[in-house]
Each structure stands twice: as C-alpha cells, then as structure tokens.
Image: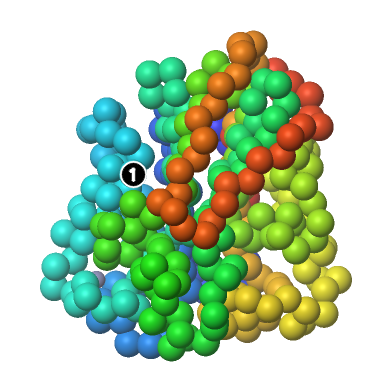
C-alpha cells in the first residue's frame, strides 16, 4: 500500500485541528471541531483531543485487529476519556472530532465515518459509493447554544468526544478488498465540492486519483473565493469561522489498487438515523494501476 497526502494550513487557522494516522493496513482521518467558545469543562484543546483520539484508535486497530470498526471507535473513545479523568467529561461542549477509518482485515475493506468526513469507495466495476454521515446538514438551528444541546444526541448529531455510544451511530460499510479499486477519506472542506459546488463523487475521486489532492484543495479554494460570503447556510457559519466560505479544513485521502475481481459490497448500516449512504450507479474513472493515498488539509 502506498500512502501519500498533502496538508495545507488554512490562512485563518491558528492551529491545525485535523489529524491523520496511517498504518500498513489502515487509515484514520480526524477533523477536530472548532471550539464554540462555551465553557467546556476540559483543560485540553481540540487538537489535543484529535491527536489523542487518533493515537488511541491506531492503538486499538493494532492491538485488537478482530474488532469491528464500531468496536474500535467505541474503545478509542473510552481510552481517550481515560486520558483526562480530571476533566468534566459530562460537559456537552467537551472537545470533539469527526472520525473516518478505513481498515483492511481478512480480505475485507471496512469503512466507518462519524460526522462530516465522508468515505468514498470505488469498486473495480466503476461503481462509486459514498458513506456519508450528514446529520449536521439537517439541524434545526446552528447557533452555539443549539449545537451544544444537539451535540451527541439523537435529536441532533453524533461526534467523537466523551460518549462511547457515539460509535453506534456511525455510518459503516464493508467491501471485499479484492473488489476495491480506490477510496478516499475527505473532510467536509473537500466534500463540499459535492455538497455545494455540483461535483459528483466520481469527479472528486477522479480528481484525487489523477491530479492529486492539491488540485482538489485548489478547486475548493477557487470556488469559495468566487462565492459571496453568506451564500451557504449551515453549521460552518456558526462554528466560530470568521469567513463562512473560506479557510475551512481541506483534507482528502485516497487509495487506489489494481485489482480484478467480482464485486459484492455490503450495504452500510447507520443505526436507523438520517444519514444516507449514497450510491452512484456508475463511475466515470478508469482503473488505477497502483496504490495511491492522498490527503489534503488546511
Ligand atoms: Zn480534558
């Protein structure tokens, strides 16, 4: 497996709140949630949470290879909680992060995403499947008090923080490794090319494969600079960003593999919640011939 990525800090970012961990057979991408400014009962910051959680998840994946990714995520949150027992772990504003994991195990490529970091998988027949947890796109309100109330609740959205049961609300999928041609883990900074700017998942994955993550980052920045501030409504406008459409996190990770085998992927499950994994009937990129993993970030 060949892994590569790009990380381009946002001009607005004081500190990078994203984190990536990659091993021989897994990749983890975390996008730390910008602090709301409300008291959060924790002496640590978002970057601490994202890096510690990423480290714990990697440890679980290495030490417990037989666990499902839901179990991995749950255990990772538990272990991260144990790193700061002195903090108020009941505070709903405690630092949090999205999580996406792709893991190869016993011939399967397992995927999980919790909150705003889609996983895109292309199989050898050209079909592109996007695993998306889009609860945050359907909230009744986006002011910080509402987000505090809705965070990690079935009325709102789930994110990795202090509640292990968040893992049970994640969106998961699994594919035969032999049938996977390429995949990507993208934070919402990249996936908004699809959500806001009319790209297809196939187009995004194709760009990552052929032109690299830098091109995807350049495309989103160009699109955002051409967009009037306030054009898009949603959480980003209320999460402390000074410019709603600029300076967001951009991160993408893709892998490609030359393989030839029939396809039979399992349907993602989602614990009966709003996010709907998207299936696109036909991809439009041809087979890649080597592993490629790319990641962009700001
Ligand atoms: Zn803490």
Describe the colour scheme in one phrase.
rainbow
The image shows residue 21 at horizontal and vertical percentages of 42, 43
The one nearer the camera, 6 or 30, is 30
Residue 243 vs residue 111: left or right?
right
* x 54%, y 27%: residue: 265
The image shows residue 241 at horizontal and vertical percentages of 59, 79
The image shows residue 40 at horizontal and vertical percentages of 31, 81
* x 61%, y 35%: residue: 121
243, above or below 105, in the image = below
* x 34%, y 52%: residue: 168
The image shows residue 219 at horizontal and vertical percentages of 79, 55
Mark 1 neighbour class, 10 Å CA radius: few under 14, some 14 to 19, many 20 or more: many
Which residue is under mark 1?
70
- Secondary structure at badge 1 equals helix
The one nearer the camera, 195 or 45, is 195
Q: Quadrant of ligand 1?
A: bottom left
269, above or below 276, in the image = above
Tell me, yes or no, if residue 14 can be seen here. yes
């Amino acid at each position: 497996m060949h892994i590569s990525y790009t990380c381009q800090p946002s001009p607005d970012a004081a500190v990078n709140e994203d984190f990536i961990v990659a091993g021989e057979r897994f990749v983890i991408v975390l996008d730390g949630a910008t602090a709301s400014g409300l008291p959060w009962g924790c002496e640590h910051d978002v970057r601490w949470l994202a890096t510690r959680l990423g480290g714990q998840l990697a440890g679980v994946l290495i030490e417990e290879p037989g666990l499902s990714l839901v179990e991995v995520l749950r255990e990772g949150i538990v272990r991260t909680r144990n790193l700061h027992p002195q903090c108020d772990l009941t505070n709903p504003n405690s630092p949090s992060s999205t999580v996406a994991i792709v893991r190869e195990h016993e011939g399967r490529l397992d995927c999980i995403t919790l909150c705003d970091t889609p996983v895109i998988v292309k199989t050898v027949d050209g079909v592109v499947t996007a695993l998306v947890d889009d609860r945050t796109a359907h909230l009744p309100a986006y002011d910080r008090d509402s987000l505090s109330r809705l965070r990690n609740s079935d009325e709102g959205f789930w994110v990795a923080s202090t509640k292990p049961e968040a893992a049970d609300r994640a969106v998961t999928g699994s594919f035969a490794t032999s049938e996977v041609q390429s995949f990507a883990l993208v934070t919402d900074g990249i996936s908004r090319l699809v959500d806001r700017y009319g790209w297809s998942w196939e187009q995004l994955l194709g760009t990552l494969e052929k032109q690299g993550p830098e091109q995807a980052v350049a495309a989103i920045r160009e699109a955002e600079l051409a967009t009037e501030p306030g054009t898009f409504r949603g959480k980003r406008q209320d999460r402390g960003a000074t410019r709603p459409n600029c300076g967001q996190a951009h991160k993408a990770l893709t892998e490609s593999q030359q393989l030839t085998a029939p396809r039979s992927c399992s349907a993602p499950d989602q614990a009966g919640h709003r996010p709907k994994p998207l299936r696109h009937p036909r991809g439009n990129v041809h087979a890649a011939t080597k592993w490629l993993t790319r990641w962009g970030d700001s």
